Image (cartoon, helix red, strand yellow):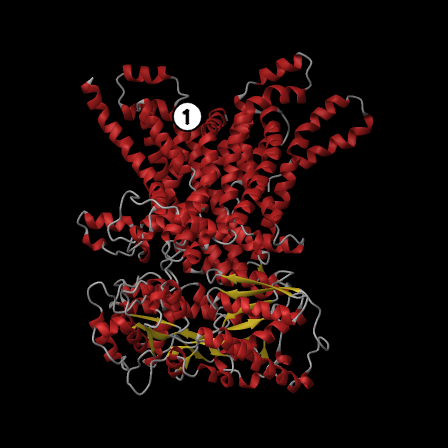
Amino acid sequence: MSRRALRALPLNLAALVVLLASVFPVYWMVATAFKPTTDINASTPQLLPLHPTFEHFRTAVGVDGFWRFWRNSAVVSLGAVVLALVVALMAAFAVARMRWRGRQAFVLMVFVAQMAPWEALLIPMFIIARDVGMLDRLSMLTLIYFMATLPFTIVTLRGFLAAIPPELEEAAQIDGASRFEAFRRIVFPLLAPGLMSTSLFGFITAWNEFAFANALIIKNQDNRTLPVWLSSFGNVFGTDWGATMAAATLFMLPVLAIFLVLQRRVTGGIVAGAVKG
Amino acid sequence: MKSRLVAVCATLALAGALAACDSGSSADPSGNGTPEPAALTVWFMKDSFSDKIVQGFKDDFESTHPGTTLDIQIQEWDGIGQKVTSALASNDAPDVIEVGNTQVAQYAASGGVTDLTDKVDDLGGDDWIPGLAEPGKVDGKQYGIPWYAANRVVIYNKDLFQAAGITTPPTTREQWIADTTKLDTGSTQGIYLPGQNWYTLSGFIWDEGGDLAVQDGDTWKGALDTPEALAGMAFYQKLQALGDGPKDSDEANPPQADVFAKGDVAQVISAPGGAVAITKANPKLEGKLGFFPIPGKTAAQPGAVFTGGSDLIVPAASKHQAMAYEVVKALAGEQFQKTMAVEMSYVPNKTSFASVLGGNEGAAAMAAGAANGHATPNSPNWAAVEAKNVIKEYMTKVLTGGDAAGAAAAASASMTEILGADS
Amino acid sequence: MLTEAPPSLAPTTRDAPARREPRFRIAAAWPYLLVLPTVVGTAFLLVYPLVRSVVISLQHFRIGELIRGGATFVGLDNYREALGSRELWDVLLRTLVWTVVDVVLIVGISTLVALMLARLGKRMRLAVMSALVLVWAVPVLAATTVFQWLFQSRLGVVNWALTSIGLDQFDGYTWFADGVATFAILVLLVVWQSVPFAALTLYAGLTTVPDELFESARIDGAGAVKTFRHVTFPMLRSLFGLITSLEVIWVFKCFAQIWAVSQGGPDGATTTLPVYAFQVAQSLHKYDLGAAISTITVLILLVVLVPHLRHLYRTERAEA
C-alpha cells in the first residue's frame, strides 16, 4: 500500500502542479475582486481575501449601462448560437447520413471556412453593413457571429451524429416512420445533449467577440456589447483593479455556468468525430 | 459657485445677443432663424469636461432650442482614430465630434468633414488662438473649429513641499532636480512621471532646441536622434527616476490623478484641470495643491510646452448640418468658453476670453508656460505616429536601460517612414 | 471558395416536369437543400467579404476612399509594397516562431496532461478535470485582464513572488516593457487557455483505446515511451492531427489576446501577422495594404495546412 502510494506520488504531485497552475489565475481574479482596495494595494499580497467585500461588484454593476450591455451580449450570442445550430444541424445531417456528389468538397469548404481571417474582414464588413444599412444594429453582429461559429458547429455536430448508429433510424423507418419522423423521434433525443454542448463553443465565441462589436456599433452606443465595454475597463475603473477583476468575474460567470453543465459531451463529440472521420 | 454661474450666464446672454446682431450680415446659408429641431449626437472625449459642465451645456442648449435633444456620448482615447474614421465613413454619423488638435488634420484631409470656412466670420475666427485654428485648416479651408486648449504645468502637494522645507517653487531645471531629489525620500515620491508622457518629453526636447520631426521641403524626417533631442530625453530620464512612475505606461494608465490623490506624491505634470480630478478622488487635498510652470533651462524663460487642445468638427455624413452648426457655435461661443475656462482651467479658444482666468492659480501657471508653446508636426500623418506609439515605445526602451542613441535612430526612422506615407 | 452544391441542384429542378419517380428525385435533392443555408450563409457572410477584401488589396484604398468611395485599381502594388518591406518578413518569421512555440507547447503539455489524467485516481482526476474546465470557461478578455494584473509591475503577484524568493531584480520589474518578456507572457497566456480543450479531448480519446492494448504492451515489456509510440499515438493519430491543425489555425490567427495585452508592442516584439494587418489597416489607415497582408496570411495558412486538408479530403473520399 505505502509503496504504491509512494510510486503514485510523483504522478499526484504533477497533477497538483497542473491543478494549481490552471486554477491560480482564475483564483487570483476572484480573490482580488473580493479584497478591499487597501489590501489590493498592500505591498505584500494576501493570498486569501481576509476581509471579503462586495464593494467592487457593486462598483462594477453600478456602472451606467452594465446590465444593458450584458443583455445585448446575451441576445446577440444566443441568437447567433440558435441560428448556427439549426443551419449546422441540417448540414451535418446531410454530411453524416447521406451520399451525394460534392460532399467531400463541402466538408473541405467547412474546414477551410474555419481558417477565415475574421479581423481582416472588418473593413469589408463595415462597408457592406454600411451599404445595406446594417450599421449600429445588433442583428448584423448576430449574423457575423453566426457565420463565425457555423463551421465549427457543423464539424462537431457531424461527429455527434456519426456516433449515433444509423441502424436506429432504419429500424424506425422499417416500422413505418418517415425519415423526418425517425430523425425527430429517435435521433434528436440522442443528439440533444450534443446540440446543447456544441452551442457552448458558439456561445463563447460570440460572447467574447470584440473587434466587430467595436467597429460596427458606432453611433448607437446603447447597442454596445459587454466585451467592448469591458475593454474600456482601464478607462472605466482606472487603478481600481478590484472593480476590474469583479467585472471580469461577472463576465465569466454565464459561460462558466453553462460550461459546468455541458462540457463533458463536447469533448465526447469531437472524439467521436475525429476517431470515426 | 452657482450664483456666480448665473451671473456669468446673464452677462453672456447679453454678449451673445450683441454678437448675433453683429454677425447678422454673414447669415448662415442654411436659412434664417433657427434650424429644424432634431435629435443630435455629440461626441466628447473622456475627461475633457466635468459632468457638471456637460450636463449644464446640454440643459442649456435644449432649453434654448426647443424640440432639439442632445445625446452627448463620452468617447475613450484608446482606439479613437478608428472610431472617428468609422463615424465619418458611415451614413448616419454623429453630428458634432471633438477631435484632438494633433489629429484633426487627418480627418480634415479625408473629405468626410464639413467645410466651415464660410462660418469663420460668424464665429469671430480672427481672434482664435493659432494652436487650435491652424491644425483645423487644410488647403486654406477651415474644417476644425477651435474649442479649447491647455498646456501642462507642474501640480504639487503643498504639504509635502513644506515638509521638505521648499518655500518657493523651482524656476530652473537645476533647482527643480535638486528640489525633487530632496522630496524623493522614504515613501514620498519626488515626482510621479510615467515613462510614456511624450508631451512632456517634447517640451524638454524643444527646450534644447530640438524637435520631434523636421520638415525638409515636402518631406518630414524624424528627429529624435539629434543631439538636442537626446539631451531632452536624458533630462526626462533623470527626472523620471525621482519617483516610482511606471516606465511602460502613460499618464492615463493608471490615471495619474488617482496616483497623486493618494497623497504621497509631491509633483505631477498635468494640465491644471487635472487638479479637478485629483480633488474629486481625494477631497482632503482641496486647497493643498499648488501650480508652477514647468521650469526651463534658465529662470528667464519657463520650459517649452506642448499646446494641447481640441477642435470641433461636423461630419459631412451628419444628417442635421444646420443644427450641428448651432451646437458648434454654442460650444465655441463666449458663454460656454468662459464657463468651462473657469471650471476646468482651460485656455479658451479666443485670447479675448482669457481674462476670466485672472486670479486662477493653475491658469496663471499655465499662461506663463503658454508663452513658450509648441505644436506637434503639422502633417496629416502625425496621428499615425501617435497611433503606432513610436515615441512612447522609444521612451520605454531608453528608460529601461536601452541604448538611447540606437533607439532614437530607430524611432526616427520609423517616424520618417510613417510621415512620408501618402494618405 | 469551394462551393459545389448549386450545379448539382440544377438537374433536379430541370427534370421536375417529368415527375416519373418523384420520391427518388426529392430524395436526391435533399442533401443539397439541407446544405443550402450553409452555402448561402457562407457565400454572403464569408466569401463575399473575402472577395471585397481581395478587391481592396488591389486598389488604392485609404481613409479618403473609405469615406468618399471611388477607389482606383493599382494592380499588385500593395502586394509589392508588403512583400518588399523588411518588416513583413520580420513579422512573418515572428509569426512562425509564435505558432511553432505555442503549438508544440500546447500539444506537448496536453498529451502529458491527458496521459496523466488516465493514470490518476478518481478523485484527483475529477479535481484536475474540473480545474481544466474552469480555465476553458474563462473568456479571452477576462483572461487577458487577469494576466496583466498578475504581471503588473508594482502590485503584481508574480513580481512579489519572484522578489520574495530572492530574485531582487524583479522588484517592480516592468514585464510589458521588454519584448521577450511580453512575448513569453503571451505564450503563457495562450498555452494556458488552450491546453484544457486539447488535454480534455485527448483524454477522452485515450479512454476509447481498449485497455487490452495497453495490457499487452505491458506484458511485452514496453516502457511508457514505447507504449505511447507504438500503441497510443497510432490509435489516436487522426485525433492528434485534428487537434494540431485546429491549434495551428487558432494560434496563427490569434489576435484578441495579443491586441489586448500589448497591441503588438513593445517595439513590435509581439506583432504577428494578424496584428500587423490590423495595425496597418486601422492605425495607419492603409486599408489596402492591410488587406494585402491579410490575403498573404490566408495563403500561408492554407499552405501550412495542405497536408491535413489532403488527409481530410482522402478520408472523406474513402467514406463516400
Who's the residue at 77% across and 21% down the image? Answer: C21
x, y (%) of residue B4?
50, 77
Q: Is residue C77 above or below residue B108?
A: above
Instruction: Tell which residue pokes out farthest to the left in this image.
Output: C166
Please give the count of numbered marks on the rendered protein.
1
Instruction: Say left or right for A106 vs C311.
Output: right
Who's the residue at 66% across and 11% down the image? Answer: A175
Q: Is residue A206 above or below residue B97?
A: above
Q: Secondary structure at mark 1?
A: helix
x, y (%) of residue B181?
21, 72
Instruction: Say left or right for B17 vs B373.
Output: right
Q: Is residue B149 above or below residue C310?
A: below
Please, what is the three-letter code of the amino acid marked with disc 1?
A: Gly
Instruction: Say left or right for B314 vs C278.
Output: right
| Residue A115 appears in view | no
Q: Residues within 10 Å of mark 1 (few under 14, many from 20)?
A: many
x, y (%) of residue A119?
51, 50
The residue indicated by pointer 1 is C205
**Quarter assignment of residue A158:** top right
In front: B297, or B286?
Answer: B286
In front: C1, or A186?
Answer: A186
Who's the residue at 41% across and 25% down the image? Answer: C205
Check the residue under mark 1 and report the chain it is in.
C
